Image (tube, rainbow, N blue to C red):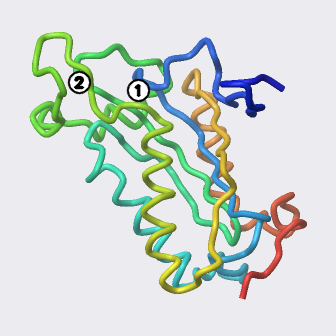
Amino acid sequence: MDKFKNKYRIPSTRAQWWDYGQNAAYFVTICTAHRRCYFGSAAATGIQLSEMGKLAYNYWAEIPKHFPFVILGEFVIMPNHVHGIVIIDKPGNERLESVQPAAATTVETATTATVQSVTGGKNEQWYPGTLGVVINQYKRYCTIRIRKIYAGFAWQTRFHDRIIRNHNEYKRIENYIINNPSNWKGDKFMKSCIVAL
């Protein structure tokens, strides 16, 4: 384990060779602390969201309102985790091939006007502009609101991401997310699920 200022710290799980502020599509998984099932339960018709699960859903759906350079792909709120595709699509920046499927039908040029830059110059620094900032703010807003319902709510401190590199991978991950509720009984997250309430 590495040390920082003479204290041990856990190294980042983010890819050291990658700029998480550049345009790309990411598959994100965020788990609740101890994989507790705060967000609902599985039923024959799919996941039945609790009040906390509905908040997690609504805040996820609102991410582009707070981060205008973000496009959301498929996402699902499961009993103890969230899966979603987050696409960073800053105007004027090059896109990866994987960004094209969703961005081609949902990005409008008006996005450029709504994103505020720090410098205002030609080489604008977008703020906030990384996947980590987007996810941490999502977790923060959820935590503040959900703790009004259940004071013990918490997330795992980290989140998992995968850089989606091409259209085929994008479609495979998209299908995984769509089918996740129907596959819940065999899901590794279900096997470790602890009912919170």
| Above or below: residue 180 compared with residue 176 | below
For image coordinates 48% across by 66% down, the residue present is 142
Label 2, on which residue? 91
User: Residue 110 vs residue 105: left or right?
Assistant: left
Point out which mark residue 148 bears: none
| Above or below: residue 81 compared with residue 55 | above
| Above or below: residue 50 compared with residue 179 | below
For image coordinates 49% across by 48% down, the residue present is 136
Quadrant of residue 16 within the rendered picture: top right
In the foreground, 194 or 49: 194
User: Residue 163 vs residue 144: left or right?
Assistant: right
The C terminus sits in image quarter: bottom right
The crowd level at tag 1 (other Cα within 10 Å; few <14, some 14-19, many 20+) is: some
In the foreground, 138 or 23: 138
**Percent coordinates x, y for residue 104 in the rendering:** 32, 31
**Percent coordinates x, y for residue 83 in the rendering:** 61, 53
For image coordinates 40% across by 26% down, the residue present is 100
| Above or below: residue 68 compared with residue 145 | above
In the foreground, 171 or 184: 184
**Percent coordinates x, y for residue 193 in the rendering:** 82, 71
Q: Amino acid at mark 1?
A: Gln
> Of discs 2 and 1, which sits in the foreground?
2
Q: Amino acid at mark 2?
A: Pro
The crowd level at tag 2 (other Cα within 10 Å; few <14, some 14-19, many 20+) is: some
Quadrant of residue 119 within the rendered picture: top left
Q: CA distance from mark 2 to mark 1?
A: 13 Å
Secondary structure under badge 2?
loop
Label 1, on which residue? 100
The N terminus sits in image quarter: top right
Q: How many marks?
A: 2
